[in-house]
Amino acid sequence: MIYEVHNLSFNYGQDQVLKEISFDLKAGEVLGILGPNACGKSTLLKILTGLLKNPHGKIKAFGKDLTQWEAKALAQKQAYLPQNPSWDFPFSVLQFALLGRYPHQKNPLHDSQEDFNLAQTSLVRCGLKSKAHQKIQSLSGGEKQRLLLARALTQEPQALLLDEPLSHLDLKGQWQLLDLFKKLHQEEGLSSLVVLHDPHWALQACDRLLMIKAGKVFKEGPTKDLIVPELLSELYEVPLDLFKPQEKTLNIFSPHSF
Protein backbone atom coordinates (compact mmCIF):
# COMPACT_ATOMS: atom_id res chain seq x y z
CA MET A 1 0.00 0.00 0.00
CA ILE A 2 1.30 3.47 -0.91
CA TYR A 3 -0.90 5.57 1.40
CA GLU A 4 -3.24 4.58 4.22
CA VAL A 5 -5.21 7.48 5.67
CA HIS A 6 -7.55 7.03 8.64
CA ASN A 7 -9.81 9.71 10.19
CA LEU A 8 -7.68 12.60 8.94
CA SER A 9 -8.78 16.03 10.12
CA PHE A 10 -7.04 19.37 9.70
CA ASN A 11 -7.66 22.93 10.87
CA TYR A 12 -6.48 26.29 9.58
CA GLY A 13 -6.73 28.19 12.84
CA GLN A 14 -10.35 27.87 13.97
CA ASP A 15 -11.55 26.63 10.57
CA GLN A 16 -11.78 22.87 10.16
CA VAL A 17 -10.91 22.11 6.52
CA LEU A 18 -10.79 18.30 6.56
CA LYS A 19 -13.06 16.14 8.70
CA GLU A 20 -12.29 12.47 9.33
CA ILE A 21 -11.07 11.63 5.82
CA SER A 22 -10.18 7.97 5.23
CA PHE A 23 -8.88 6.32 2.05
CA ASP A 24 -5.96 4.33 0.66
CA LEU A 25 -3.88 4.27 -2.50
CA LYS A 26 -2.67 0.95 -3.84
CA ALA A 27 0.53 0.38 -5.83
CA GLY A 28 0.07 1.16 -9.53
CA GLU A 29 -3.29 2.87 -8.98
CA VAL A 30 -4.53 6.32 -10.01
CA LEU A 31 -6.86 7.81 -7.42
CA GLY A 32 -8.61 11.02 -8.47
CA ILE A 33 -9.89 13.62 -6.02
CA LEU A 34 -12.98 15.56 -7.07
CA GLY A 35 -14.97 18.20 -5.24
CA PRO A 36 -16.03 21.86 -5.20
CA ASN A 37 -13.55 24.67 -4.64
CA ALA A 38 -12.32 25.07 -1.05
CA CYS A 39 -13.42 21.57 -0.02
CA GLY A 40 -9.90 20.58 1.09
CA LYS A 41 -8.45 18.82 -1.97
CA SER A 42 -5.17 20.74 -2.16
CA THR A 43 -4.84 20.71 1.65
CA LEU A 44 -4.96 16.92 1.57
CA LEU A 45 -2.06 16.73 -0.91
CA LYS A 46 0.02 19.22 1.09
CA ILE A 47 -0.43 17.12 4.22
CA LEU A 48 0.85 14.03 2.42
CA THR A 49 3.91 15.94 1.19
CA GLY A 50 4.69 17.14 4.70
CA LEU A 51 4.18 20.81 3.80
CA LEU A 52 1.34 21.05 6.32
CA LYS A 53 2.14 19.70 9.77
CA ASN A 54 0.26 18.25 12.73
CA PRO A 55 -2.93 16.86 11.21
CA HIS A 56 -5.20 14.76 13.38
CA GLY A 57 -5.61 11.10 12.50
CA LYS A 58 -3.29 8.41 11.20
CA ILE A 59 -1.33 8.51 7.93
CA LYS A 60 0.95 5.78 6.68
CA ALA A 61 3.12 6.40 3.61
CA PHE A 62 5.05 3.57 2.00
CA GLY A 63 4.50 1.31 4.97
CA LYS A 64 5.33 3.59 7.89
CA ASP A 65 3.88 6.51 9.77
CA LEU A 66 4.22 9.79 7.88
CA THR A 67 5.76 11.49 10.93
CA GLN A 68 8.66 9.00 10.88
CA TRP A 69 9.84 10.10 7.44
CA GLU A 70 12.59 12.66 7.02
CA ALA A 71 11.71 15.13 4.27
CA LYS A 72 14.56 14.15 1.95
CA ALA A 73 13.91 10.43 2.32
CA LEU A 74 10.21 10.92 1.62
CA ALA A 75 11.05 12.97 -1.47
CA GLN A 76 12.91 9.94 -2.83
CA LYS A 77 9.59 8.08 -2.76
CA GLN A 78 7.10 10.68 -3.93
CA ALA A 79 7.03 13.74 -6.18
CA TYR A 80 4.65 16.67 -5.80
CA LEU A 81 3.39 18.76 -8.71
CA PRO A 82 1.92 21.96 -7.22
CA GLN A 83 -0.96 23.90 -8.70
CA ASN A 84 0.78 27.28 -9.07
CA PRO A 85 4.58 26.92 -8.96
CA SER A 86 6.87 29.92 -9.30
CA TRP A 87 8.57 30.38 -12.67
CA ASP A 88 10.58 33.45 -11.67
CA PHE A 89 13.92 31.68 -11.30
CA PRO A 90 16.61 32.13 -14.02
CA PHE A 91 16.80 28.40 -14.80
CA SER A 92 17.06 26.67 -18.11
CA VAL A 93 14.65 23.82 -18.82
CA LEU A 94 17.42 21.29 -18.16
CA GLN A 95 18.41 22.96 -14.88
CA PHE A 96 14.80 22.89 -13.74
CA ALA A 97 14.50 19.17 -14.53
CA LEU A 98 17.73 18.55 -12.59
CA LEU A 99 16.05 19.89 -9.43
CA GLY A 100 14.39 16.50 -9.25
CA ARG A 101 17.73 14.95 -8.30
CA TYR A 102 18.09 16.96 -5.09
CA PRO A 103 16.60 14.30 -2.76
CA HIS A 104 19.17 11.77 -4.02
CA GLN A 105 22.27 13.97 -3.92
CA LYS A 106 24.86 14.00 -1.15
CA ASN A 107 26.27 17.24 -2.56
CA PRO A 108 23.41 19.36 -3.98
CA LEU A 109 25.93 21.71 -5.58
CA HIS A 110 27.23 18.98 -7.87
CA ASP A 111 25.20 17.24 -10.56
CA SER A 112 26.69 13.92 -11.60
CA GLN A 113 26.66 12.53 -15.12
CA GLU A 114 23.93 10.14 -13.99
CA ASP A 115 21.87 13.12 -12.84
CA PHE A 116 22.25 14.78 -16.24
CA ASN A 117 21.36 11.57 -18.05
CA LEU A 118 18.19 11.08 -16.01
CA ALA A 119 17.12 14.70 -16.53
CA GLN A 120 17.74 14.55 -20.26
CA THR A 121 15.84 11.28 -20.55
CA SER A 122 12.89 12.81 -18.70
CA LEU A 123 12.88 15.80 -21.07
CA VAL A 124 12.85 13.47 -24.06
CA ARG A 125 9.93 11.50 -22.64
CA CYS A 126 8.00 14.70 -21.99
CA GLY A 127 8.69 16.10 -25.46
CA LEU A 128 11.03 18.87 -24.29
CA LYS A 129 14.40 17.76 -25.63
CA SER A 130 14.63 20.68 -28.07
CA LYS A 131 13.83 23.15 -25.26
CA ALA A 132 16.58 21.96 -22.88
CA HIS A 133 18.67 25.15 -23.01
CA GLN A 134 15.83 27.67 -23.18
CA LYS A 135 14.81 29.68 -20.12
CA ILE A 136 11.76 28.29 -18.36
CA GLN A 137 9.93 31.61 -18.74
CA SER A 138 9.88 31.09 -22.52
CA LEU A 139 7.72 27.98 -22.30
CA SER A 140 4.01 27.85 -23.02
CA GLY A 141 1.54 26.77 -20.34
CA GLY A 142 1.41 23.23 -21.68
CA GLU A 143 5.19 22.99 -21.87
CA LYS A 144 5.51 24.17 -18.28
CA GLN A 145 3.13 21.46 -17.12
CA ARG A 146 5.16 18.86 -19.01
CA LEU A 147 8.33 20.26 -17.44
CA LEU A 148 6.86 19.78 -13.97
CA LEU A 149 6.23 16.17 -14.92
CA ALA A 150 9.78 15.85 -16.30
CA ARG A 151 11.21 17.14 -13.01
CA ALA A 152 9.07 14.61 -11.15
CA LEU A 153 10.30 11.75 -13.35
CA THR A 154 13.90 12.84 -12.78
CA GLN A 155 13.15 12.39 -9.09
CA GLU A 156 12.49 8.66 -9.75
CA PRO A 157 9.48 8.47 -7.41
CA GLN A 158 7.13 5.60 -6.73
CA ALA A 159 4.16 7.95 -6.39
CA LEU A 160 3.01 11.26 -7.85
CA LEU A 161 0.90 13.86 -6.06
CA LEU A 162 -0.61 16.16 -8.69
CA ASP A 163 -2.65 19.25 -7.87
CA GLU A 164 -4.81 20.20 -10.85
CA PRO A 165 -2.18 19.36 -13.51
CA LEU A 166 -4.58 20.25 -16.35
CA SER A 167 -5.37 23.77 -15.16
CA HIS A 168 -4.49 26.71 -17.45
CA LEU A 169 -4.31 24.40 -20.49
CA ASP A 170 -6.49 24.46 -23.57
CA LEU A 171 -8.30 21.31 -24.68
CA LYS A 172 -5.41 20.06 -26.83
CA GLY A 173 -2.89 20.69 -24.07
CA GLN A 174 -5.05 18.87 -21.55
CA TRP A 175 -5.43 15.88 -23.84
CA GLN A 176 -1.71 15.71 -24.64
CA LEU A 177 -0.70 15.89 -20.97
CA LEU A 178 -3.28 13.30 -19.97
CA ASP A 179 -2.10 10.96 -22.73
CA LEU A 180 1.52 11.35 -21.56
CA PHE A 181 0.46 10.75 -17.96
CA LYS A 182 -1.32 7.51 -18.88
CA LYS A 183 1.66 6.24 -20.91
CA LEU A 184 4.06 6.94 -18.06
CA HIS A 185 1.84 5.02 -15.67
CA GLN A 186 1.80 2.03 -17.96
CA GLU A 187 5.57 2.11 -18.46
CA GLU A 188 6.69 2.98 -14.92
CA GLY A 189 4.02 1.38 -12.75
CA LEU A 190 3.64 4.64 -10.85
CA SER A 191 0.91 5.34 -8.32
CA SER A 192 -0.82 8.72 -8.39
CA LEU A 193 -3.11 10.86 -6.31
CA VAL A 194 -4.44 13.57 -8.59
CA VAL A 195 -6.73 16.53 -7.92
CA LEU A 196 -8.99 17.27 -10.90
CA HIS A 197 -11.86 19.63 -11.63
CA ASP A 198 -13.29 18.08 -14.77
CA PRO A 199 -15.21 14.79 -14.31
CA HIS A 200 -14.53 13.94 -17.96
CA TRP A 201 -10.77 13.83 -17.39
CA ALA A 202 -11.29 11.87 -14.19
CA LEU A 203 -13.15 9.25 -16.20
CA GLN A 204 -10.25 9.04 -18.65
CA ALA A 205 -7.42 8.89 -16.13
CA CYS A 206 -8.50 7.47 -12.78
CA ASP A 207 -9.09 3.95 -11.50
CA ARG A 208 -10.96 5.16 -8.43
CA LEU A 209 -12.31 8.46 -7.12
CA LEU A 210 -12.40 10.15 -3.75
CA MET A 211 -15.18 12.73 -3.80
CA ILE A 212 -14.88 15.40 -1.09
CA LYS A 213 -17.59 17.85 -0.10
CA ALA A 214 -17.34 20.37 2.75
CA GLY A 215 -14.17 18.68 3.98
CA LYS A 216 -15.74 15.22 4.29
CA VAL A 217 -15.73 12.10 2.13
CA PHE A 218 -18.84 12.34 -0.03
CA LYS A 219 -18.31 9.15 -2.05
CA GLU A 220 -15.39 6.79 -2.75
CA GLY A 221 -15.22 3.99 -5.28
CA PRO A 222 -14.52 2.95 -8.90
CA THR A 223 -14.59 5.90 -11.28
CA LYS A 224 -17.15 4.41 -13.64
CA ASP A 225 -19.60 4.00 -10.74
CA LEU A 226 -19.28 7.60 -9.54
CA ILE A 227 -19.20 9.64 -12.75
CA VAL A 228 -22.96 9.66 -13.05
CA PRO A 229 -25.28 12.68 -13.32
CA GLU A 230 -27.06 12.17 -10.00
CA LEU A 231 -23.88 12.08 -7.90
CA LEU A 232 -22.16 14.90 -9.78
CA SER A 233 -25.21 17.12 -9.41
CA GLU A 234 -25.27 16.52 -5.66
CA LEU A 235 -21.51 16.92 -5.27
CA TYR A 236 -21.32 20.27 -7.06
CA GLU A 237 -24.85 21.44 -6.17
CA VAL A 238 -25.83 22.20 -9.74
CA PRO A 239 -28.91 21.22 -11.76
CA LEU A 240 -29.06 17.57 -12.72
CA ASP A 241 -29.65 18.44 -16.39
CA LEU A 242 -26.15 19.95 -16.61
CA PHE A 243 -24.72 16.43 -16.48
CA LYS A 244 -27.28 14.82 -18.79
CA PRO A 245 -26.09 15.07 -22.43
CA GLN A 246 -28.76 16.45 -24.72
CA GLU A 247 -29.66 14.95 -28.07
CA LYS A 248 -27.15 15.77 -30.82
CA THR A 249 -24.61 17.16 -28.35
CA LEU A 250 -21.23 15.82 -27.36
CA ASN A 251 -21.39 13.27 -24.55
CA ILE A 252 -18.47 14.54 -22.48
CA PHE A 253 -18.62 11.50 -20.22
CA SER A 254 -18.03 8.96 -22.98
CA PRO A 255 -14.51 7.48 -23.10
CA HIS A 256 -14.76 7.74 -26.87
CA SER A 257 -15.62 11.45 -27.06
CA PHE A 258 -12.17 12.38 -28.40
Image: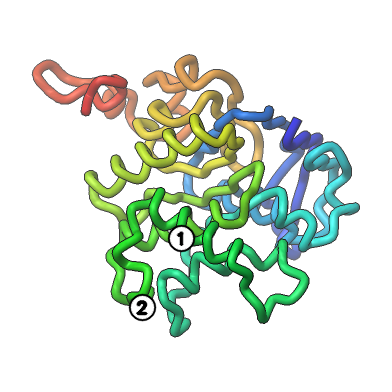
- Amino acid residing under circle 2: Lys
Residue under pointer 2: 135
Pointer 2 local density, CA inside 10 Å: few below 14, some 14–19, many at least 20 = some
In front: 189, or 51? 189
Q: Which tag, 2 or 1, sits closer to the chain's start?
A: 1
Contact (Cβ within 8 Å) of mark 2 with mark 1: no
Q: What residue do we see at 52% from left, 60% from top?
A: 117
Residue 28 x, y percent position in the rendering: 61, 29
Residue 75 x, y percent position in the rendering: 71, 57
On screen, residue 2 versus residue 127, left or right, reads: right
Q: What residue do we see at 67% from left, 29% from top?
A: 27
46 in relation to 3, above or below: below
In front: 27, or 14? 27
In the picture, the quarter occupied by the N terminus is: top right
Find the residue positioned furthest to the front.
113
Q: What residue do we see at 58% from left, 69% from top?
A: 99
Q: What number is the disc on residue 120?
A: 1
